[in-house]
Image (cartoon, helix red, strand yellow):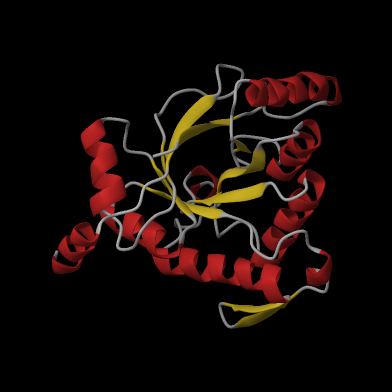
Amino acid sequence: MKVSFGVHVAPSGPFLRREDTGRFSDLVKMAEDYGAEAIGTYDTAFVGGDAYVRATVMAIASTRARIGLRPTNPITREPQIMASFLASIDGLTGGRAFMDMASGDSAVLNIGYKIATRARIEEYIACVRDLLATGEATYQGRPQRVRWTSSAVRKRVPISICAEGPRMLHLGGRIGDGVIAGTGLLPDVIKTVSLESTPEPVRRVAIHPRSTSGSRPARRCTRIVKRRSRASRRRCRRS
């Protein structure tokens, strides 16, 4: 079993100002020096600032860690826009972009929308993946196209699902490249999440302790690589 960790970073205020970029870049470099495998930033305009701006600064400052949105949602950005963003960050980092997908929360509720359903999350992720891979997709019955696919660094960028309840955990196990499980770090919880709650083998499970943000010590997550046994899969099918 391999254990690694990632961090969530944000500027000290709601907006990243020119005079803050040096310190913010130093924070990214410090996280890498401490061994962070992934460095993410929130994507909610309600909290402040633009995630794409922060992620660009993070991508330029980093040299080893994966860079991405932790988390984003399928409501506030069209999948074509998201696919272009992921390909751009992948280009700046030489293939180190990632995305964590959630249902919305503050980014969605504060513009009068309901949080995304599991079906919407699944369709959104499928569309983003198709755009990166082939340049064409369909989303909510609408055609989506891009013309830059041949120039993308990778045809697939890792997408993890943020989940707490059993239905989202199942969705993450079925379609995600990983699961971000905000349910704690106790051994029993890890066992339940990684061995019982998902319908298919999850290559990567991340457990998020609810800790810090902003200028305080960076929010941490532990990523656990684990595959389920055949017996576990049989138990899941019967339940």
Residue 52, by quadrant, is top right
Residue 107 in the figure: left or right of residue 137: left
Numbered circles on residues, count:
0
Residue 212 in the figure: left or right of residue 98: left
Q: In which quarter of the image is the N terminus?
A: top left
**Residue at the location (56% across, 23% down)?**
218
Residue closest to the eye, 79 or 34: 34
Residue 39 in the figure: left or right of residue 1: right
Residue 117, by quadrant, is bottom left
Q: Position of residue 209 (x, y in %)?
A: 39, 29
Residue closest to the eye, 167 or 231: 231
Q: Position of residue 82 (x, y in %)?
A: 68, 59
Instruction: Give the answer, above or below, for where 17 lies relative to 182.
Output: above
Q: In which quarter of the image is the C terminus?
A: bottom left
Q: Position of residue 229 (x, y in %)?
A: 25, 56
**Residue at the location (37% across, 39% down)?**
182
Instruction: Give the answer, above or below, for where 19 lies relative to 37.
Output: above
**Residue at the location (47% across, 67% down)?**
122
Q: Position of residue 120 (x, y in %)?
A: 47, 67
**Residue at the location (51% across, 71% down)?**
123
